[in-house]
């Protein structure tokens, strides 16, 4: 491998030490040297060392590639009609997941692999360089294992979500027996994370006791934990996630004071998914309240065919700024360093010596343009290989 010098950077978001005390560690007049997939040097362009190749980005902004820490990318079919019905007034309750399960089970490996590859290309073309992928549209041991195997072909951040909803051929009791007795032991080692859809407000998902049983069994089997919590109504998901040391609790739309206090006192990241509120026409989470309480906030797409069919982190950043009271800097930080923390990763989400050479470039001079020019395809992953 050869050293690549990235120069001509209008604004560099490092999320590390910068010029001034800003949230993003901004640097101007900077250059970056990458080699063997790692950042080797960050400094003033006038002092840059020689390199084998020079990439001049012509005054554009460079930032850490986005870390999309919550997706459900292994699926077949779509639910456009369900979306249209919702826009005509129907409520989302998770019931539509069964149709994606049927379409996914009916697809062969190569079909699912090709759909997944298209989605990965799509997210990379919008600046995402790390992605977490959940199973959860198989809901049999064999179909969940297959989804995890396909996900592992494209990312190390794989998540077993067998406890997504109860499939049509089961009731809660029989399905939980299957998850606890067969799926968790079979999927241990096939995924890094385990997640559960803890949502007493949905007849299809799991209440606090059921979620606790799944999370504890997952932890005992060696998974690290994540939780879908407090999406459709108030509930125990957030406090359970903090109590059990989950890396992240995702959605966080309906929180009471005790939930916010628990997050502020614990280490669990609150991952907000405003694309879901956009596509389900729901009230947005109160990001300001979480940030003001000192909670680490991450942003992710939740890309899935039901509640948010987008791979675009720039859209999510724009929604966070325009609808959730986040500043542009807070949103960019949440989509990079915050999300990296939600995956317990310190090698992505920043541009500092030793971090992975996962860079994104904007067709704009500053990160501000991500929210300022919503819907414009400004971001892409930068090839420094
Ligand atoms: O994160 N909430 C549960 N699961 C997904 C939606 C899945 C679907 O509707 O297909 C979510 O919103
Ligand atoms: Fe989700």
Image (tube, rainbow, N blue to C red):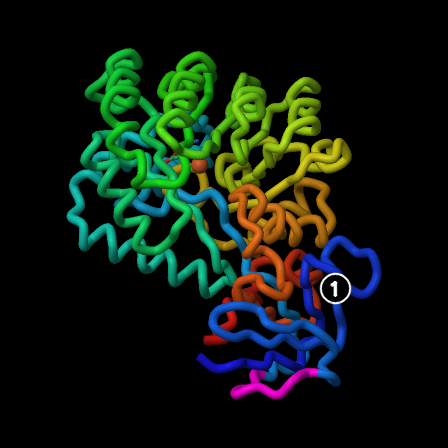
Specify the quadrant of the image occupied by residue 374: bottom right
Of 176 and 89, nearer the camera is 176
Quarter occupied by the N terminus: bottom left
Please state the horizontal and vertical placement of residue 83, each as a whole percent of the image.
40, 38
Relative height, residue 41 to residue 356 (above, below): below
Please state the horizontal and vertical placement of residue 259, each as a whole percent of the image.
64, 22
Specify the quadrant of the image occupied by residue 190: top left
Per the rendered image, the range of residues in magenta is: 48-55
Q: Residue at x 40, y 18 (%)?
A: 206
Of 317 and 87, nearer the camera is 317
Q: Quadrant of ligand 1?
A: top left
Relative height, residue 131 to residue 360 (above, below): above
Q: Residue at x 71, y 53 (%)?
A: 328
Instruction: Name the main secondary structure of what is drawn in magenta.
Output: loop
Q: Residues within 10 Å of mark 1 (few under 14, many from 20)?
A: many
Query: Is residue 25 found inside the magenta-colored segment of the image?
Result: no
> Position of 375 compared to 9: left or right?
left
Specify the quadrant of the image occupied by residue 34: bottom right
> Position of 134 compared to 254: left or right?
left
Of 251 and 208, nearer the camera is 208
Numbered circles on residues, count: 1
Q: Residue at x 54, y 81 (%)?
A: 4
Relative height, residue 42 to residue 88 (above, below): below
Please state the horizontal and vertical placement of residue 305, each as a whole percent of the image.
37, 42
Q: For ligand 2, tell me if the residue under mark 1 lies within 8 Å.
A: no
> Position of 246 compared to 264: left or right?
left
> Position of 385 compared to 58: left or right?
left
Residue wearing tag 1: 26
Q: Residue at x 28, y 23 (%)?
A: 179
- In what element is the residue under mark 1? strand
Please state the horizontal and vertical placement of residue 258, each as a whole percent of the image.
67, 18
């Amino acid at each position: 491998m050869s050293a690549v010098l990235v120069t001509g950077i209008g604004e560099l978001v490092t999320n590390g030490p910068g010029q001034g005390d800003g949230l993003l560690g901004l640097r101007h007049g900077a250059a970056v040297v990458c080699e063997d997939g790692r950042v080797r040097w960050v400094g003033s362009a006038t002092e840059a060392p020689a390199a084998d190749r020079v990439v001049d980005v012509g005054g554009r902004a460079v930032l850490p590639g986005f870390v999309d820490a919550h997706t459900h990318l292994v699926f077949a079919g779509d639910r456009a009609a369900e979306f249209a019905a919702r826009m005509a007034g129907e409520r989302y309750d998770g019931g539509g997941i069964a149709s994606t399960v049927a379409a996914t089970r009916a697809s062969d490996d190569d079909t699912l692999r090709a759909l997944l590859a298209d989605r990965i290309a799509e997210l990379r073309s919008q600046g995402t360089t790390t992605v977490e992928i959940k199973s959860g549209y198989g809901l049999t041991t064999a179909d969940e294992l297959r989804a995890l195997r396909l996900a592992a072909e494209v990312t190390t951040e794989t998540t077993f979500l067998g406890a997504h909803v109860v499939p049509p051929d089961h009731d809660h009791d029989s399905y939980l027996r299957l998850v606890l007795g067969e799926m968790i032991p079979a999927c241990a080692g096939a995924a890094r994370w385990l997640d559960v859809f803890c949502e007493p407000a949905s007849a299809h998902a799991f209440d606090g006791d059921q979620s606790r049983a799944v999370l504890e069994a997952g932890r005992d089997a060696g998974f690290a934990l994540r939780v879908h919590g407090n999406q459709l109504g108030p509930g125990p998901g957030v406090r359970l996630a903090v109590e059990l040391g989950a890396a992240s609790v995702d959605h966080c739309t309906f929180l009471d004071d005790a939930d916010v206090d628990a997050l502020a006192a614990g280490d669990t990241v609150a991952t907000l998914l405003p694309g879901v509120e956009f596509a389900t026409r729901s009230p947005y989470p109160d990001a300001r309240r979480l940030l003001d309480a000192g909670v680490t906030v991450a942003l992710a797409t939740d890309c899935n065919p039901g509640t948010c069919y987008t791979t675009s982190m720039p859209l999510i950043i724009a929604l966070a700024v325009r609808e959730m009271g986040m500043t542009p800097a807070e949103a960019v930080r949440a989509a990079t360093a915050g999300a990296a923390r939600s995956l317990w990763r310190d090698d992505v989400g920043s541009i500092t010596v030793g971090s992975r050479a996962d860079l994104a470039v904007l067709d704009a001079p500053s990160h501000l343009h991500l929210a300022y020019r919503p819907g414009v395809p400004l971001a892409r992953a930068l090839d420094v290989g």
